[in-house]
Image (spheres, rainbow, N blue to C red):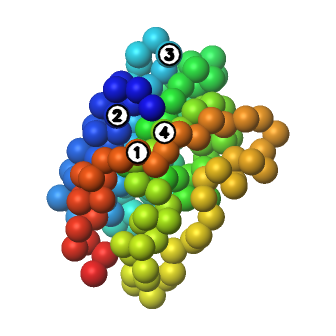
C-alpha cells in the first residue's frame, strides 16, 4: 500500500466522520481515476432513509454518472471500511478494478455486533469478487487507527 493510498484512505475516514456528524453511519468512500479525477461519497442510510445508501454504493452511482467506462476501468475505489456484499456487487458491476480499504469487515463486525436488531452480514469483499468473471484487486485492511476511532461509541 502506497503513501498515496493511505492519504486517500484518510480522506475516506474524514468523509465518514462528516457522515456521522450529520447523523448517518460513519462510512466514506472516494473513487480516483488514473488521470486523477476524484469522486467522493458518504453514507446516506439515515438522512435519505435509504438502506442501500452505503458510501461505496453512493460513490459508485456518482462515479458512473460522471465518468465514462474507460475512466472507471482505470479507477481505484478507496473506502474507510471494507465494502459489504451489496457494495462489492456495485463495485464489480461498475467495472472498477481496484479496491483499497482501511477497517476490515471482521473488524467492523467486532465493533457492531448487532445494531437495530439486524446482525451484520459476514461476507468479505474478496469472497464476493472471487465469484466474478473479472479480477478485482483488493488491498486492505490498512493500519489506520482513525478508521476504528470514527466508529467509537456509534454502534452502542
Instruction: Choose top left, top right, bottom left or bottom right for residue 44.
Output: bottom left
Q: Residue furthest right?
A: 133
The dot on residue 155 is none
Circle 3 residue: 34
State yes or no: discs 2 and 1 in contact (Cβ < 8 Å): yes
Spatial separation of the CA atoms under disc 4 and disc 1: 8 Å
Q: Which residue lies furthest to the bottom in this view?
A: 117
Circle 4 residue: 100
State whether residue 16 is above or below residue 37. Answer: below
Residue drawn where x is 41% and y is 26% of the image: 2
State yes or no: discs 4 and 1 in contact (Cβ < 8 Å): yes
Circle 1 residue: 142
Residue drawn where x is 46% and y is 71% of the image: 109
The crowd level at tag 1 (other Cα within 10 Å; few <14, some 14-19, many 20+) is some
In x, y percent, where is residue 153? Answer: 22, 73
Circle 2 residue: 6
Amino acid at each position: 500500500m502506497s503513501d498515496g493510498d493511505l492519504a486517500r484512505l484518510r480522506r475516506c475516514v474524514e468523509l465518514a466522520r462528516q457522515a456521522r456528524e450529520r447523523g448517518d453511519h460513519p462510512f466514506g468512500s472516494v473513487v480516483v481515476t488514473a488521470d486523477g479525477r476524484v469522486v467522493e461519497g458518504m453514507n446516506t442510510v439515515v438522512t435519505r432513509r435509504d438502506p442501500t445508501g452505503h458510501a461505496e454504493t453512493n460513490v459508485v452511482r456518482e462515479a458512473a454518472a460522471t465518468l465514462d467506462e474507460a475512466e472507471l476501468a482505470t479507477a481505484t475505489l478507496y473506502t474507510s471500511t471494507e465494502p459489504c456484499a451489496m457494495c462489492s456487487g456495485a463495485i464489480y458491476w461498475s467495472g472498477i478494478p481496484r479496491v483499497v480499504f482501511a477497517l476490515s469487515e471482521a473488524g467492523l463486525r467486532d465493533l457492531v455486533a448487532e445494531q437495530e436488531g439486524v446482525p451484520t452480514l459476514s461476507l468479505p469483499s474478496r469472497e464476493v469478487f472471487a465469484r466474478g468473471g473479472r479480477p478485482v484487486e483488493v488491498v486492505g485492511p490498512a493500519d489506520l487507527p482513525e478508521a476504528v476511532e470514527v466508529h467509537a461509541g456509534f454502534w452502542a
